[in-house]
Image: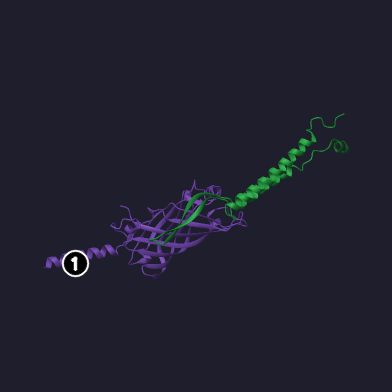
Chain colours: A purple, B green
């Protein structure tokens, strides 16, 4: 009897530890949904596009959401607009210089102002270092986190597979001159500010 | 003394003028009609068209690109400019020998 109780207690402790332990989410999405969208106002219409090769890992602790930390990176040459010539210009040395700076990244070590925003949903501010064109600056990004327990298998049409999902959404803007992108040039034609929005999903870390 | 022995006959020049003016108008008309038929797109020309999609589980709205040519106002403007240049070329007159002599 004592042995059985001990076994149950041990099993319970193991399950609780597993649930409460920080989870690492991998943001290299197998369905290719992850992307960062960018918009710059310009003369005729806003220049808009996406950067779709997203990778990175985020450590998320359901018991301590503020301790969430991680790094998200996009491959610079995955930037794309709806006009191929415009995309070529964007990737060139004058703009993001994809050849010399193949990665754009945001690394954050904690979340501030964490507030519940619904079931398994929180709003917060991620403070961290944003790197673009080799220039790193500290920025604050308002984010929304959504934790979807057990949704990984369902999403990839394999419901038997265990695993949770973490969805991170956010929007922020940067000044292109701060990152050495045509500082002071053509500001009457192309806005000096770049708006960035993202909605990213992370799944269980690949072992 | 012949004024300009290497000049083609006036009727040939006039025929070319008519032809070029017609071609200029046709180019401009074709460009306008093509632009209109492709949806009167008032932005820049698109070589790939963004299509919004929704991931049902995460409710993430994401964008995929469809390879499709949608002419924009830059295409329209460029085409009409080319048409106008072709049309305008017909108004260039070779200086007549009389005026050349007068100028000299």
Rendered location of residue B71, percent (x, y): 58, 50
Above or below, comparing residue A117 to residue A191 in the picture: below
Q: B90 or A115: nearer the eye?
A: B90
- Is residue A184 toward the left or the right of residue A60 in the image? right
Quick one: quadrant of the N terminus of chain B?
Answer: top right
Crowding at dot 1, Cα within 10 Å, few <14 / some 14-19 / many 20+, comes out as few
- The total number of labels drawn is 1
To which residue does mark 1 refer? Answer: A9
Residue at point 88%, 38% (across, down): B102
Split into 4 quadrants, where in the image is the C terminus of chain B?
A: top right
Query: With A200 as the anchor, is B3 left or right in this view?
Result: right
Chain ID of residue with mark 1: A
Residue A153: percent from left, percent from top: 32, 57
The quarter holding residue A198 reads bottom left
Residue A146 shows up from this direction:
yes
Where residue A85 appears, as percent x and y from the top left, is 56, 47
Q: Nearer the viewer, residue B4 or A74?
A: B4
In the figure, is residue A159 to the left or right of A190?
A: left
| Camera sees residue A133 | no
């Amino acid at each position: 009897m004592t042995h059985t109780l001990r076994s149950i207690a041990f099993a319970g402790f193991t399950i609780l530890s597993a649930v409460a332990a920080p989870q690492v989410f991998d943001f290299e999405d197998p369905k290719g949904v992850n992307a960062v969208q960018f918009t710059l106002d310009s003369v005729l219409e806003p220049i808009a596009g996406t950067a779709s090769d997203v990778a990175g890992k985020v450590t998320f602790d359901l018991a301590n959401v503020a301790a969430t930390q991680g790094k998200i990176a996009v491959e610079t040459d995955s930037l794309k607009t709806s006009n191929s010539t415009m995309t070529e210009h964007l990737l060139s040395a004058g703009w993001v210089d994809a050849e010399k700076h193949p990665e754009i990244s945001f690394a954050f070590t904690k979340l501030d102002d964490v507030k519940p925003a619904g079931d398994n949903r929180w709003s917060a501010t991620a403070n961290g270092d944003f790197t673009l064109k080799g220039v790193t600056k500290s920025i604050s990004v308002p984010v929304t986190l959504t934790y979807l327990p057990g949704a990984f298998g369902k999403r990839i049409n394999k419901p038997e597979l265990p695993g949770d999902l973490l969805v991170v959404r956010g929007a922020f803007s940067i000044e292109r001159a701060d990152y050495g992108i045509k500082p002071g040039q053509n500001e009457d034609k192309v806005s000096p500010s770049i708006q960035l929005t993202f909605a990213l999903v992370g799944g269980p870390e690949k072992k | 003394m012949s004024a300009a022995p290497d000049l083609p006959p006036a009727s040939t020049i006039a025929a070319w003028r008519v032809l070029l003016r017609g071609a200029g108008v046709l180019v401009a008309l074709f460009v306008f009609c093509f632009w209109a038929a492709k949806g009167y797109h008032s932005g820049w020309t698109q070589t790939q068209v963004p299509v919004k999609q929704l991931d049902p589980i995460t409710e993430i709205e994401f964008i995929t690109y469809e390879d499709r040519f949608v002419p924009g106002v830059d295409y329209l403007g460029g085409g009409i400019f080319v048409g106008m240049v072709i049309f305008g070329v017909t108004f260039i007159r070779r200086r007549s020998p009389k005026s050349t002599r007068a100028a000299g």
